Image (spheres, rainbow, N blue to C red):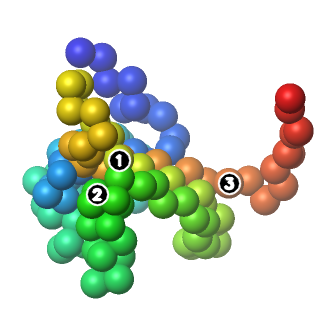
Amino acid sequence: MIDFFKGVNPAITVSDKDGNVIYQNDSSIEVNGDARGRNLEQCHNPKSWAMICHMLEANVSNVYTISKKGKKKLIFQTPWYEEGEEGKPAGLVEFSMILPEEMPHFERS
């Protein structure tokens, strides 16, 4: 299978329903180190781990911005699903992307 996310700029990290990291693209490994096989609880403080558990239990997404090393980033975390397991998260995927200082905004109908 082609790894469509291998060379893209956003850092993409995928975990299973127990919080074990099962995939990272190159950008994620560069930013976070190689966390594949590790549990997200090891990499997060208790408040963040509680949010991860909440997203999995309540089947909800989490979106916020951060500043890190002088760059503003959008963090989008959301459940992903196995085929045939509708409504039951199989884990989480996190997209972390650098936002430009000036970014256009468009209204579309």
Residue 71 to residue 97: above or below = below
Splitting the image into 4 quarters, where does residue 72 fall?
bottom right
Of the residues shown, which amino acid type is indicated by label 1?
Answer: Pro
Q: Name the residue tied to disc 2.
A: 56
Do the numbered discs 1 and 2 sit on residues whose CB atoms are within 8 Å? yes
Residue 51 to residue 100: above or below = below
Quarter of the N terminus within the rendering: top left
Q: Which mark is residue 99?
A: 3
94 relative position to 76: left or right: left
Residue 28 to residue 43: above or below = above
Furthest-top residue in this view: 1
Judge the density around disc 3: few (<14), some (14-19), many (≥20) Cα neighbours within 10 Å: some
Of the residues shown, which amino acid type is indicated by label 2?
Answer: Leu
- Mark sitting earlier along the chain (1/3): 1
Name the residue located 84 percent from the left edge and 55 percent from the top edge: 102
Label 1's element? strand
